[in-house]
Amino acid sequence: MGLGLETFPTLAAAGEALAANAAARYLGGGTLVVRSANEGDVGFETYVTASERALTDIVVADGRATIGAGVTMARIAREPALGFLAPAARAVGGPAIRNMATVGGNLFAPVPYGDFAVALLALDASLDIDGEPVAVSAFLAGRDTTHAGALVRSVSFTLPAEGSFLFAKASRVRPKGASVVTIAAVVEERAGTISSARIAYGCMADRPIRAPAVERALAGKARTAEGIAAALAVATEGTAPPTDAIASAWYRGEVLPVHLKRLLLPA
């Protein structure tokens, strides 16, 4: 029996259809749910999607960006106003995947995927879920419980100061391999020292996480080898990296400080 497809004019209507049918799954870009079906998941029989325009809008105004959950990685990568995010968007798969993978879908991507969600965590983004703002950190912490099955309409964040957003992904297969470790950061400096830092990791837990110990260690320090030494010493604090076909937990813990150092030190 084939899978059905139901399209609704609004995200709210799609949500109602999903609530009424336990055998339905939301279809965004399809890189997760279609793959699941292709690999033999028989737990659903209907795709549900929405054609609401807000899902594919990008609005950049007054120092803030709002990106619809249905916007693809390929579109972000070529959006001039979001040029700083292009490396994070291009880190998601190859060209074919980036033409399908969406902002909203990436928030649900399991390890070793979800590179763009790491960037959103470093940007301290806010999600629109049922018209209510939800911090991306809170969403990620509860995506299997409180926010399981949530439909995200958009993400928004304050545009970082020029040059303050940093992103790196380590992969065994380039240019489109799954992540060994992903790091995103927003590092602001004043008078030669770091005034604030938000550091996010991918593949250092079962979902993207912040690195508060590193953030505290960087505050007030210069971005020099000596200035970031204390941050590198606590780089793995609070992490629980997985072991999978890509890398072992031990290996991820070993290479994390190496890539964090490369990211933080000015070229």
Image (tube, helix red, strand yellow):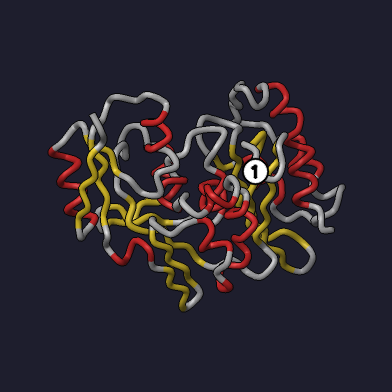
- Residue at 32% from the left image edge and 65% from the top image edge: 54
Place residue 107 in its image quadrant: top left
Q: Quadrant of the C terminus?
A: bottom right
**Whole-percent x, y for residue 182 in the image:** 64, 42
From the image, tell me which residue sits under label 1: 176
**Whole-percent x, y for residue 167 in the image:** 67, 52
Residue at the limit of the structure toward the bottom, as seen here: 62
Q: Relative to residue 132, is residue 21 drawn left or right?
A: left
In the image, residue 130 sits, relative to residue 17, either above or below, namely: below
Q: Relative to residue 1, is residue 102 drawn left or right?
A: right
Q: Which residue is nearer to you in this view: 114 or 249? A: 114
Q: Quadrant of the N terminus?
A: top left
- Residue at 63% from the left image edge and 69% from the top image edge: 161
- Residue at 30% from the left image edge and 66% from the top image edge: 53
In the image, residue 77 sits, relative to residue 17, either above or below, namely: below
Characterize the local packing of mark 1: few (<14), some (14-19) or many (20 or more) Cα atoms within 10 angstroms.
some
In the image, residue 232 sits, relative to residue 125, either above or below, namely: above
**Whole-percent x, y for residue 151 in the image:** 30, 48
Count the marks: 1
Q: Amino acid at mark 1?
A: Lys
Place residue 21 in its image quadrant: top left
Q: Relative to residue 221, is residue 179 drawn left or right?
A: left
Place residue 162 in its image quadrant: bottom right
